Image (cartoon, grey):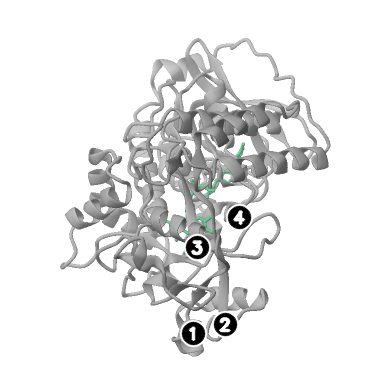
Amino acid sequence: MTKTETKTDFLVVGAGIAGLVVAHSLSEFGKVLVITKGKLKQSNTYWAQGGIAAVTDKEDSFESHAEDTTIAGAGHCNGFAVKYLVAHAPKAINFLKSIGVEFQEDPVLEAGHSFPRVLRTSDYTGQDILNHLIKAVKKKKNITVQEDTEAIELIEYSGKCYGAFVRHEENEEITPIFAKNTILATGGCGQLYEKTTNTTGSGGDGLALAANVGLELKDIEFIQFHPTALDKPDNNRYFLLSEALRGFGARIVNERGESFLQKFDKRAELAPRDLVSRAVYFELMNGPVYLDMRHNEASNIKKHFPNIYKRVKEYGFDLGKDLVPIIPVAHYACGGIPVDLTGATKLPGLFAVGEVACTGVHGANRLASNSLLEAVVFSQAAASALGGNLESEQAELIDTTIPLDIPKIVIEPMDQVMAYSKRLGQIMWKHVGIIRTTEGLEKAKKQIISIPARDYRIQHRQLICYKIIEACQNRPESLGTHYITSELV
Ligand SMILES: Cc1cc2nc3c(=O)[nH]c(=O)nc-3n(C[C@H](O)[C@H](O)[C@H](O)COP(=O)(O)OP(=O)(O)OC[C@H]3O[C@@H](n4cnc5c(N)ncnc54)[C@H](O)[C@@H]3O)c2cc1C
């Protein structure tokens, strides 16, 4: 599967759900090269548990799904994009079924939804979807997948994008890959925070690549914090206790075993994530907070959530018997590179899909299980639009010589990179987290700039941290996940 290509019709950067769906759909139009840093299954998609939202019941409606999305998004959503998303959800589900994904018959309820409309295969739905996508992509002769290949800079020439410079992890070589169209599908940026559910690859690379060619980023102050991560860090990330557990009756309680969410919102456990995260955050100031499923039979929990049950047991807790300690952690980037409904960015030849893109559907706070959906719907839309793009002027220019300077990057030892990443994460967590203050943001900005970023990975992270802070400062009022106060907490 690993092979070095230097020229392609479509270069897809990233191999999560968005990258693989767009690659699969594009393969009918031309040669597709998918590159991913690390190995194929190292993505957030692999870890998605809950499922994918779609209207499949006659008693449910697109209007209701759109309304729930907009309410969760604090009214900041792009209404047209939301309508497109929910209306194309059944087609997205049919596509996933066509490649072999087997959804359970009855959709489940998740927080913020007014109807049980979350489709799942198991409690590791992302993994199931990804495995089927990998199989489907492998069957396509037009698609090549290169692992251990990291995009480090976009090739921009005369106001257009012609591919990317990549670094091959095997031999550290940097080479250009020319493409008629480049599609960023690099996922989120949770790893910019000390505490996150995100995998190590989610450091906001795509945002940095886009920002470095002068593209503005949109809504990046809206970092979603998931309220129920298991409070035991593991390998640089926190294990998620899916929202579906609350849909199944799990309660959130304080150390006295009391429910407290009702005080914050009458929907309590089923309120949108931003509200629940803040409520948990404030309660944590008084003592530990727990997820409580003890009123369910362990056998029933095991039946519905076999993988989560097993994993939590490995951390030393029995979901049927124990209170499980939780904390809210960074989970999802609601904003990103602004795109239209076909994934087009402001730079001709450059597209973005999945979590790295900002279609506007999530507004200021994403509704549960709308992310996998967004990735499929808009990756398919991007592929349809891109299919007609091959014969363009761009296509001809690619075969002429573009003057190139191989980027001169500094690569520092990994322990140094990790130490600086950790420092950035701590600053972001402390000052740019669930509760932000004007003073804290200013402090964070100064501390972030003071980190001596020479290695390109730290430069990328530093740039995006800085841009997130600026975005927070440009929004002095609280909205959705962005909660800002003048009082120190
Ligand atoms: C624990 C967890 C549970 C979740 N549960 C759900 C859920 O139930 N439902 C839901 O809708 N959403 C869920 N989400 C969110 C959802 O999983 C993600 O938003 C979605 O999978 C993002 O898909 P993506 O393809 O955009 O990015 P990813 O799946 O993260 O893939 C990004 C890809 O880009 C690659 N990459 C990154 N940078 C570079 C680079 N510089 N060069 C080359 N390759 C690069 C990565 O290696 C990876 O292959 C969950 C997220 C997490 C973390």
Which residue is depicted at the point 27% across and 45% down? Answer: 82
Task: Give the image quarter of residue 54.
Answer: bottom left
Q: In this figure, which residue is indicated by the disc labeled 3? A: 283
Q: In this figure, which residue is indicated by the disc labeled 1? A: 294
Q: Is residue 258 visible?
A: yes
Q: Nearer the viewer, residue 256 or 110?
A: 256
Residue 41, label in figure: 4
**Coordinates of residue 393 in the picture (x, y in percent):** 41, 15
**Coordinates of residue 280 in the picture (x, y in percent):** 48, 61
- Name the mark nearer the viewer: 4 or 1: 1
Q: Is mark 2 within 8 Å of ligand 1?
A: no
Q: Which of the two discs, 4 and 1, labels the residue nearer the N terminus? A: 4
Q: CA distance from mark 4 to mark 3?
A: 36 Å
**Coordinates of residue 182 in the picture (x, y in percent):** 50, 30
For the residues labelled 3 and 1, say whether their Cβ atoms are less than 8 Å apart: no
For label 4, the SS is loop
For label 2, the SS is loop
Answer above or below: position of 417 versus 59: above
Q: Is residue 6 visible?
A: no
Q: CA distance from mark 4 to mark 2?
A: 32 Å
Residue 322, label in figure: 2
For the residues labelled 2 and 1, say whether their Cβ atoms are less than 8 Å apart: yes
